[in-house]
Image (spheres, grey):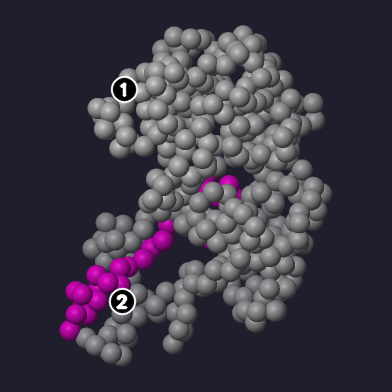
Amino acid sequence: MRTVGTVVRGVRAPIIRPGDDLVKIVVDSVMNAVENENIKLKSNDIVAVTEAIVAKSQGNFATIDDIALDVKNKLGGGTVGVVFPILSRNRFSSILRGISRGVDKVVIQLSYPFDEVGNPLVSIDKLYDLGLYEFSKSFSSKEFTDLVKDVTHPFTGVNYIDMYKQICECDCEIILSNNPTEILKYTKKVINADIHSRFRTKKILLQNGAEKVLSLHEILNKSVNGSGFHEEYGVLGSNLSTSERVKLFPRETKTFVNNLQKAFKERCGVAVECMVYGDGAFKDPVGGIWELADPVVCPAYTEGLAGTPNEIKLKYLADNKIANLNGQEAIDAMKKLITEKENNLVNKAESLGTTPRRITDLVGSLCDLTSGSGDKGTPIVLVTGYFDNYATE
């Protein structure tokens, strides 16, 4: 009987530069790990590559001036509102600098007490103590800071109201409101900077009198003067690269994962599954931050990773269907239940308590936690035995 199930390993790789043959680098890195760590690579094991090195190898970068020019061309300058940006030095600060270079004045509307992905502007408990329960009131930045006093982020130590004002290279005003139409009191030209709710926010703004609304996925969705771009996500999923440059989300990722799968098959004769992953989709129970600042967890994957898990709940079955069995007899009975399970367990008692999330979201989150966002140096993740179960020999 197998004694180990799923094993996740971060795989070290060289520093990736534009123009590098990333398929070859990933295969070489994984095979080096397999040989040195005595790992047996099997069909349906997973090789995952972080989006950052895919984009870097493609050279998918753009400058702050590229963002500014695209914003100016699409909105025509003047006063522009920016609604619901996330609070991030890495994710949004460069985009904001670019926006501010392309307009005459920017009015930034922050949500409170936290942004879309859970970064707290102020403690929700503090607002409750001040008698604010529904968060329906709108504030100027002065009114808000006079009320709550301290808006320093508990983790980063950053006052995002002050930081965003300082970043802007034009006249800047900041307001706080959870009503997207509040911005229309200041301007009819708006950039809605939210990520996962962007289509809804844009629709609401247009229905309530906005003349022009631009979402972040519509900025740099085409190349500007030879810049990088992303046709579907624009500057969504971008990261700070230098003070004057951002790395965009990678393009042609489906081609990349298919080529990677083919290269592994040619190299070692094993049909591994391959995927590109970005932010994981999980929530920090202490800080309340929902990690997913990328537009998706997994922009591309090979076909074997499609769908959702079809699993039965061992704890439920152990306490019900085989409650009278022990030892080897219980093990054999459980294996039989697994091998004979239905192909679709949706809404079945046997699957009660299992996780009905997409496999790519689950594996992508697992990989993001493994590779981390700091100095681990493992932008490639090898997941073995993910599709095994208790009955797998």
Q: Can you say which quadrant of the picture contains the N terminus?
A: bottom left
* Amino acid residing under circle 2: Leu
Magenta segment includes 119: no
Between 136 and 52, which is closer to the camera in this rendering? 136
Give the mark, 1 or 2, whose residue is nearer the N terminus: 1
- Residue at left 72%, top 67%? 29
Horizontally, residue 299 falls left or right of residue 149, namely: right
Horizontally, residue 49 falls left or right of residue 203, namely: right
Percent of width and height locating residue 158:
53, 36
Between 288 and 263, which is closer to the camera in this rendering? 288
- Residue at left 61%, top 24%? 166
**Does residue 318 lie above or below 121 as drawn?**
below
Residue 274 can be seen, yes or no: no
Magenta segment includes 309: yes
The residue stretch that appears in magenta:
295-324
- Which residue is identified by label 2? 337
Report if the CB atoms under discs 1 and 2 are less than 8 Å apart: no
Mark 1, other Cα within 10 Å: few <14 / some 14–19 / many ≥20 = few
Percent of width and height locating residue 160:
52, 31
- Which residue is identified by label 1? 136
User: Is label 2 in a helix, a strand or a loop?
Assistant: helix
Residue 337 can be seen, yes or no: yes
- Residue at left 58%, top 72%? 43
Horizontally, residue 40 falls left or right of residue 18, namely: left
Alpha carbon distance from label 1 to label 2: 52 Å
* Amino acid residing under circle 1: Ser
Percent of width and height locating residue 25:
76, 62
User: Is label 1 in a helix, a strand or a loop?
Assistant: loop
**Does residue 68 lie above or below 245 as drawn?**
above
